[in-house]
Image (cartoon, rainbow, N blue to C red):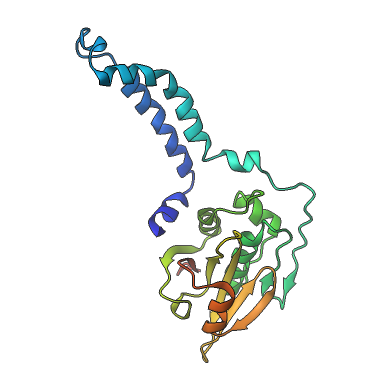
Amino acid sequence: MPWYNTFRSINRIELFSTLITPAAGFLTYRKPDSPYREYGGAANIILRALKPLAFPFCIVLISLNFARPLLKPLDKEIVFNDIWADNIVLMQSSAQTGGPAALISAMHSLNNYADSEYNAAKGTYTNRDGTEFWYLARYAVNSGYRVRFVRSSGIGNAPAPSIIPLPGDGGYIALLKHSENGMLMIGDPLAGKMDLSTDEFVALYGDPDLLLALSVPKNR
């Protein structure tokens, strides 16, 4: 959903998950209104059984937001080549870095932005499973760009540039430009620059559900 990805893209939003700890502590360890109520009722029996689980549950829930890059870090043997196809599409150096590469290509199409694939992968917390969509948005905002997650009404009407997640394999491509004759300029981190009709795009990639649209702030 656009709102959820927007929410998760806020800087350090993961830290808000720690607020569950004092809330759980208050609900599970508060004193009953009456000492006699503590021993009666099915609700109180269930509550007493759940109390020992409150702390480990909080630890697990909070850790879910931070654990993946730590448990599944990128292979240190990856060589980041920073190869540009046609001087417009940054090619990915590993199966996991398609998101950062597509993002750099999209930002480059706006105002010739350039950064290394390594920095983008590090800044988007890319791990062995790939990159979360919202971390791409966060990196773009921190780099000075405006972003918005939008529902697709067909690739022919999609804003450009935008980042498009691919179904199934966790990869990403960039829609760089709409041409006057209706063709789409695609930045595929695996294949390079491609000019496709809308039908060709749908046949190759499918029709996207959600896109990350980028724009440059007005004062730039």
Q: Is residue 144 left or right of residue 128?
A: left
Query: How many numbered marks have been drawn onto this rendered protein structure?
Result: 0
Q: Nearer the viewer, residue 124 or 183?
A: 183
Q: Is residue 135 left or right of residue 53?
A: right
Query: Image height check: is 171 above or below 203?
Result: above
Q: Visible in this render: residue 56?
A: yes
Residue at 66 percent across and 65 percent down: it is 114
Query: Image height check: is 88 above or below 169?
Result: below
Q: Nearer the viewer, residue 145 or 127?
A: 127
Where is residue 29 drawn, in percent x and y? Answer: 34, 17
| The N terminus: image quadrant | bottom left
Q: Is residue 148 left or right of residue 28?
A: right
Where is residue 19 drawn, in percent x and y? Answer: 40, 32
Q: Quadrant of residue 93?
A: bottom right
Where is residue 104 drawn, in percent x and y? Answer: 62, 65
Where is residue 177 drawn, in percent x and y? Answer: 55, 79
Q: Visible in this render: residue 110?
A: no
